[in-house]
Amino acid sequence: MAILLVVGTLLAFVLFAALYEAWAGRRRNAMAVRIQVLFEHGEDVKRSLQRLARRHDPDAQDALITLLRESAQLVLHDREDWAYGTVDRQAVVGEDAANSLVGQWATTARAAFETQTTSQYQNGDASHGYRHEPSTPGKVGGLYLAVTVCASTSGLTFPEAPGETARDVETALQTLCGVESGQLLRLEVVWSPDGDGELLSEDQAIRRYPTLTPVRWAHG
């Protein structure tokens, strides 16, 4: 009888600990980050994002971390082609709130497009790895590719923003490249247009992304 009582007490403690851990996770501080970049002549970036969406299995261990790192590195690699950019960082109480904000940002990014693409990273299948909505056919030509990277994190420290668009975007992406297991909560990557040869015109870019500011690199 005493043994059963001890076992029952231990089980109750384990259950309580698990419930407390889940509750604490929902309440602990988290960060939601949105990085948006307009690439000049972004056809190569577009193809690379498509390959990422097709290649990775989201159910594999640490798959989202790998996808985040590779997406951030891809955007960083072509930094000389950044024309406009912006970074939004919001510290929130609770992982659920951070995840919800990332979802809202991704929805807003998708809503800006007539022809839209959002990476879902499902099983390496092109029909599920990204979603393409061709209800309004895109036009070949244009100048810009829009890329939005949204992530919610917990326990990841972001350095103070330099205060200049190019460096702000660069610093945020470099920080996300260093994310570790258990720190990434949610990831959304959205890009448009997705059709071969399709890019946004100057007018489309200004109209759909009015808050982005020009990227100017200080050389020398």
Image: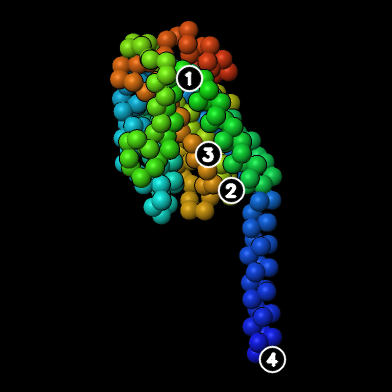
Q: CA distance from mark 4 to mark 1?
A: 66 Å
**Mark on residue 113?**
1
Residue 117 picture quarter: top left
Residue 151 — which label?
A: 3
Cα gap from disc 4 to disc 2, whole angstroms: 42 Å
First of labels 2, 1 by sequence position: 1
Q: Position of residue 80 (x, y in %)?
A: 38, 22
Compared with 76, 211 (above or below) is above
Circle 3 Cα neighbour tier, 10 Å, few/some/many (<14 / 14–19 / ≥20): many
Q: Is the residue under label 1 in contact with that under label 4 (CB below 8 Å)?
A: no
Badge nearest the viewer, 3 or 1: 1
Residue type, label 1: Phe
Q: Earlier in the sequence, mark 3 or mark 1?
A: 1
For the point 64% across and 83% down, the residue is 7
Quadrant for the N terminus in the image: bottom right
Amino acid at dot 4: Ala
Q: Which sits earlier in the primary sequence, circle 4 or circle 2? A: 4
- Indicate the quadrant containing the C terminus: top left, top right, bottom left or bottom right: top left
Residue that mark 2 sits on: 154
Check disc 4 and report its element: helix, strand or loop: helix
Q: Neighbour class for label 2 at 10 Å: few (<14), some, many (≥20)? A: many
Q: Is residue 25 visible?
A: yes
Tell which tag, 2 or 1, sits nearer the viewer: 1
Residue type of the residue flagged with mark 3: Ala
The disc, 4 or 3, on the residue closer to the chain's N-terminal end is 4
Residue in the picture at 69% in, 51% down: 27
**Label 1 environment density (alpha carbons within 10 Å; few <14, some 14–19, many ≥20):** some
Q: Horizontally, is 162 left or right of 63 in the view? A: right
Cα gap from disc 2 to disc 1, whole angstroms: 30 Å
Between marks 3 and 1, how big is the CA–CA gap?
20 Å
